[in-house]
């Protein structure tokens, strides 16, 4: 772009990550030398030089030919990857962004990934930013309107109680703890980095960066060992594999400068820190940070697993990782063979101490994980064939900003686990898993109704609650059920309703199914059995359900929905205030009014069963291991 090109907040632009790769973004703030951008794939906003940004309307306006791309190519510009299937909320978000950016497109509907879409500048479009241009020219540039950050991805505040509930069954695991090899690597790396004398550190290099270099060297060795076409042994930073492998000089490699955009926030040290402590492999030691050390002490159990990892590390690895020299492809391949995460965790010296920390130790967290794993084996869930282990998961803001979709773990489906334990008869030993299952389906029903409210005001700006109630209560095949007193209505099973809701691409129909799902949860015998646990862990959402539906069973869903909608909007405003986030909508009279709605998906709350399944696969976990412990 030219230096004098004007940009304003909210404008749709192209951000050039490299000379040939660019993405759509929105302008957040404009300064003389830099622009702050927000991305559609929800990564954290970044500040970039003005020279790396070009307004989309300017780009299209100067073209002689119409800009044309397939739907899948267009999704890559918006979300950083090509999607074969595209959910409805992404259709709406893309089209809304283009129209708001003054860009017309054809055709209106994009039925397949290969549909070719033409984009051109809409000459009738005039950007409205609400400011008097004369007054704006007189104001100093440092004066900006006060605007809260964009609304939370979790508008009803359901993520926090879900985390409390899952911490009762799989504490210490997260959506990132998907490979057992990282426990050995990190205990060894923390111990090694903290053990370096100050004069052994590269000048002005913090110890955290030395550990990051170790991780990049590890990734390079793994990548070379497996080659570009084998992605069976996934690591954090896997998406950079081809770039890293192409960065050789002849047949020699240096440690890559990066494997992630921000390794301090998205690298293994950050992502596994809580888990290391929970497994008893490390202890927090904040006082060490004052002297420039990593703020952890490795425990005796951590030392055992670090020693097992150290036996696989060649002596030349550390000098290489710290940038002293290059290494040949054959050398790195041999190092990678020894360090490979697909085999190292199965070595007895490594496997046995890891299992002690994960399942067989005396800590409270290990006991909780042990009980959950024992139930999974007893119910045959480790042996189930799973087609999509990570489908229908919703992430919180922090996790979504750094998660790589190809490193979430595999082998156990969150959805299959909660379906299974919801379908079991109420049992005291299963209460934590069954309370979690009930809450996930409760959250799904509430979210589906709120999603319909958000969709109704996103385009129109305003929606009457009575009109929205009529639309939801008459949608699909459930109209009769919505008009029957709830104590007499007989919905389908929770399994059928939840599956139908998750497959629906229509927000209003999904809300209709969501209401039936909430009603069936109230009618099933499992809710009273876990009620006390839910009140302890998830009081506010549960009391909302109780107040608006469970205590009104003489009314129909259609009669109860307006009060439920008002209560949900009230809760949304409270959640937005707590998080210091812009609200999505508000109530004005009998209408919902648009404020700052965000894209909203429907799913479970990023549970940890696929990650557990991946760890179990790495160590070849067997049911007899539980008895031998």
Image (cartoon, rainbow, N blue to C red):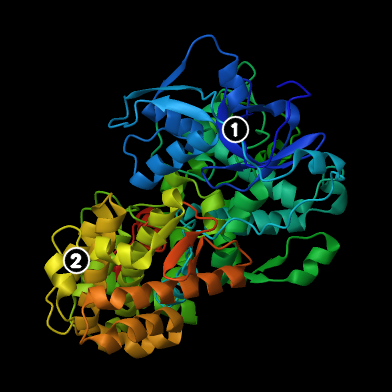
Q: Which residue is mark 1?
A: 126
Q: Residues within 10 Å of mark 2 (few under 14, many from 20)?
A: some
Tag 1 secondary structure: loop
Q: Nearer the viewer, mark 1 or mark 2?
A: 1
User: For this view, does 318 lie left or right of residue 273?
Assistant: right
Residue drawn at x 49%, y 46% is 404
Examine the rendered structure and indicate whether residue 567 appears above or below residue 214. below
| Percent coordinates x, y for residue 238 in the rendering | 50, 39
In percent of width and height, residue 100 lies at 53, 37
Determine which of the numbered discs, if any, sits on residue 249 in the image: none
Q: Is residue 375 above or below residue 105?
A: below
Q: Secondary structure at mark 2?
A: helix
Q: Is residue 460 above or below residue 77?
A: below
Q: Residue 12, how many percent across, how many down?
A: 59, 34
Residue 438 in view here: yes
Q: Nearer the viewer, residue 125 or 416?
A: 125
């Amino acid at each position: 772009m030219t230096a004098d090109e004007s940009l304003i907040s909210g404008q749709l632009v192209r951000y050039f990550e490299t000379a040939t790769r660019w993405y759509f973004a929105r302008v957040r703030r404009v300064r003389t030398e830099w622009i702050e951008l927000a991305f559609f794939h929800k990564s954290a906003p970044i500040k970039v030089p003005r020279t790396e940004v070009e307004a989309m309307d300017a780009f299209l306006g100067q073209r002689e030919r119409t800009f044309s791309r397939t739907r899948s190519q267009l999704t890559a510009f918006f979300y950083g990857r090509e999607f074969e299937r595209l959910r409805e909320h992404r259709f709406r978000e893309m089209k809304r962004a283009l129209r708001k950016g003054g860009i017309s497109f054809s055709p209106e509907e994009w039925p397949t990934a290969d549909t070719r879409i033409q984009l051109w500048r809409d000459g009738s479009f005039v950007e409205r930013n609400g400011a008097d241009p004369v007054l704006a020219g007189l104001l100093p540039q440092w004066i900006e309107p006060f605007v809260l950050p964009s609304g939370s991805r979790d508008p009803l505040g359901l993520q926090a109680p879900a985390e409390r509930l899952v911490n009762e069954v799989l504490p210490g695991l997260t959506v990132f703890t998907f490979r057992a090899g990282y426990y050995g690597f990190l205990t060894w790396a923390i111990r090694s980095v903290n053990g370096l004398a100050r004069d052994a550190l590269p000048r002005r290099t913090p110890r955290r960066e030395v550990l990051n270099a170790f991780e990049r060297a590890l990734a390079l060795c793994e990548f070379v060992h497996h080659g570009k076409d084998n992605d069976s042994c996934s690591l954090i930073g896997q998406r950079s594999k081809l770039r890293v492998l192409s960065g050789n000089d002849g047949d020699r490699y240096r440690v890559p400068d990066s494997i992630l955009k921000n390794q301090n926030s998205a690298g293994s040290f950050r992502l596994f820190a809580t888990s290391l402590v929970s497994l008893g492999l490390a202890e927090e030691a904040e006082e060490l940070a004052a002297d420039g050390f990593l703020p952890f002490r490795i425990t005796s159990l951590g030392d055992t697993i670090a020693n097992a990892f150290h036996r696989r590390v060649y002596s030349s690895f550390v000098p290489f990782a710290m940038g002293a020299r290059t290494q040949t492809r054959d050398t790195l391949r041999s190092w990678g063979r020894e360090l490979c995460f697909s085999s190292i965790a199965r070595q007895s010296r490594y496997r046995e101490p890891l299992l002690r920390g994960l399942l067989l130790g005396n800590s409270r967290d290990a006991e909780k994980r042990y009980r959950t794993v024992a139930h999974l084996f007893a119910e045959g869930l480790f042996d189930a064939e799973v087609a999509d282990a990570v489908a229908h998961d919703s992430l919180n803001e922090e996790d979504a900003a750094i998660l790589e979709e190809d490193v979430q773990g595999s082998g156990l489906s969150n959805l299959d686990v909660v379906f299974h334990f919801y379908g079991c008869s109420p049992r005291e030993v299963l209460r934590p898993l069954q309370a979690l299952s009930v809450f996930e389906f409760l959250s799904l029903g509430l979210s589906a109704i709120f999603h319909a409210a958000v969709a109704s005001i996103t385009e129109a700006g305003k929606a009457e609650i009575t009109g929205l109630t009529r639309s939801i209560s008459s949608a699909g095949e459930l109209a009769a059920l919505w008009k029957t007193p709830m104590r007499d209505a007989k919905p389908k099973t929770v399994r059928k309703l939840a599956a139908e809701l998750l497959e629906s691409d229509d927000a209003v129909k999904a809300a209709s199914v969501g209401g039936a799902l909430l009603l069936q949860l109230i009618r099933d015998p499992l809710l009273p059995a876990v009620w006390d646990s839910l009140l302890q862990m998830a009081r506010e959402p549960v009391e909302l359900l109780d107040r608006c539906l469970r205590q009104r069973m003489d009314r129909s869903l259609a009669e109860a929905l307006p009060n439920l909608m008002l209560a949900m909007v009230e809760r949304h405003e409270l959640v937005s205030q707590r998080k210091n986030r812009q609200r999505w909508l508000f109530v004005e009279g009998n209408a919902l009014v648009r404020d700052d709605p965000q894209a909203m998906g429907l799913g479970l709350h990023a549970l940890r069963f696929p990650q557990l399944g991946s760890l179990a696969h790495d160590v070849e976990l067997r049911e007899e291991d539980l008895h031998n412990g």
